[in-house]
């Protein structure tokens, strides 16, 4: 692909050699003469002169240079992601049902659906147009799968789950398993029936080996555009809003509410019925206590989670403890000497 063609496809303008042939994409520091890289930060901008990249995706206000071929775009990182999809397109699967797949009664399938080897689809399930269910997947009864969904190998979707269009479930994801609900009777735990449902919105992506539990009663829901990393656990009756991003190994206890556009780092633990308000940011490894509210737009860190400035102040004080201990010991020694002189 030529620079001119890539710029046109991105809806952008270029400067330099529009006829240069491009063969792929690469990081700024390793890109070669036939590859595209992007400049997305001041640090990256400082490395441009040492980069051998044949074409750079740069911000709109980038200064012209006679020896560099650039494409000016509003968001270089976003444009780079689009360019990657152009150079490395997703392999297309031919529609059809593999002979080893098991299809239940009353299953409705739209046009261009693919169902792979040894997949199982339960009775009364509806599969939208151009959706793909890969090898070894198990989709339960009365599941609604929107158009253009992708289930990678070995995904399990339990009964009575609704999944919106364009949603991606990565290998090992389990949607609709029972929530962790028990009641104590006569010194034994007894299972509280988990008879609720799971609803997943449009264009959600759920990472490998992540679990979204069904509600005990009612619905566990994940809103449109939300992205869950690998090994994320969403407990029963959680309500995750729209366009939330959650990094790996984070766990939501039952009844947690996360509002739109929140950002949650990796290995975060969130207690029962906590509320994370819109656009809040939870730093990696922090712990949110049961019923705690993290307010809109607030950034918190640590365990228990607290506002970032307060957390950093406490860390600074902790770092001073050895010095303060020495000072206290010195004061005690001097006080003892003064008392001896009396």
Image: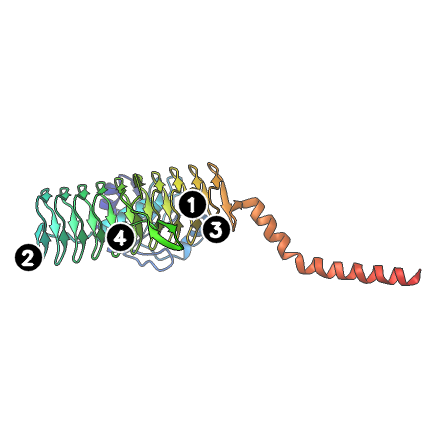
Residue 286 disc label? 3
Q: Nearer the viewer, mark 2 or mark 1?
A: 1
Element type at mark 3: loop
Q: CA distance from mark 2 to mark 1?
A: 45 Å
- Kindly state the secondary structure of the residue where label 4 is placed: strand
Few, some or many residues within 10 Å of mark 1 (<14, 14–19, 20+): some
Label 4 – label 1 distance at C-alpha: 21 Å
Mark 4 or 1, nearer chain start: 4
Q: Which mark is residue 272?
A: 1
Give the distance between the C-alpha atoms of the residues marked 3 and 2, in whole angstroms.
48 Å
Q: Is residue 14 left or right of residue 287?
A: left
**Crowd rating for badge 3 (residues with CA inside 10 Å; few <14, some 14–19, many 20+):** many
Q: Name the quadrant of the C terminus.
A: bottom right
Question: Nearest the camera: 145 or 21?
Answer: 145
Say whether disc 1 or disc 3 marks the residue closer to the N-terminus: 1
Farthest-out residue, right: 342
Is residue 335 positioned above or below 259 on the image?
Answer: below
**Mark 2 vs 4, N-terminal side:** 2
Coloration mode? rainbow
Q: Identify the residue under disc 4.
A: 174
Q: Is residue 92 visible?
A: yes
Sequence-wise first label, 3 or 2: 2
Tell me which residue sits at (35%, 56%) in the image.
27
Q: CA distance from mark 4 to mark 3?
A: 25 Å
* Residue at the disc numbered 2: 99
Q: Give the residue at x 42% y 50%.
A: 265
Q: Dot 2, how many residues are within 10 Å of its Cα: few (below 14), some (14-19), or many (20+)? A: few
Q: Nearer the viewer, mark 4 or mark 3?
A: 4
């Amino acid at each position: 692909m030529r620079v001119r063609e890539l710029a046109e496809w991105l809806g952008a303008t270029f400067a330099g050699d529009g006829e240069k042939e491009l063969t792929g994409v690469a990081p700024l520091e390793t890109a070669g003469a036939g590859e595209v890289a992007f400049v997305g930060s001041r640090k990256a901008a400082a490395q441009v002169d040492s980069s051998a990249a044949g074409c750079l995706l740069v911000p709109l206000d980038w200064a012209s240079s006679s020896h560099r071929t650039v494409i000016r775009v509003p968001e270089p990182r976003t444009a780079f992601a689009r360019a990657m999809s152009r150079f490395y397109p997703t392999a297309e699967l031919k529609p059809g049902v593999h002979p080893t797949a098991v299809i239940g009664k009353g299953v409705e399938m739209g046009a261009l659906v693919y169902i792979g080897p040894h997949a199982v689809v339960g009775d009364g399930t509806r599969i939208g147009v151009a959706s793909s269910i890969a090898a070894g997947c198990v989709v339960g009864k009365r599941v609604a799968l929107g158009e253009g969904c992708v289930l990678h190998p070995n995904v399990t979707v339990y009964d009575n789950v609704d999944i919106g269009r364009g949603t991606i479930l990565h290998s090992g994801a389990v949607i609709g398993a029972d929530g962790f609900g028990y009641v104590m009777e006569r010194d034994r735990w007894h299972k509280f029936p988990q008879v609720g449902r799971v609803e997943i919105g449009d264009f959600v992506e759920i990472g490998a080996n992540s679990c979204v539990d069904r509600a005990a009663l009612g619905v566990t829901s994940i809103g449109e555009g939300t992205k869950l990393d690998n090994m994320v656990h969403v407990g029963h009756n959680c309500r995750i809003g729209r366009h939330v991003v959650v990094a790996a190994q984070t766990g939501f206890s039952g009844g947690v509410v996360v509002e739109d556009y929140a950002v949650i780092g990796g290995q975060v633990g969130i207690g029962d019925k906590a509320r994370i308000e819109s656009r809040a940011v939870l730093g990696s490894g922090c712990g949110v206590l049961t019923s705690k509210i993290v307010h809109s737009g607030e950034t918190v860190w640590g365990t228990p989670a607290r506002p970032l400035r307060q957390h950093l102040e406490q860390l600074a004080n902790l770092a001073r403890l050895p010095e303060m201990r020495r000072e206290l010991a010195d004061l005690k020694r001097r006080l003892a000497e003064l008392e001896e002189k009396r």
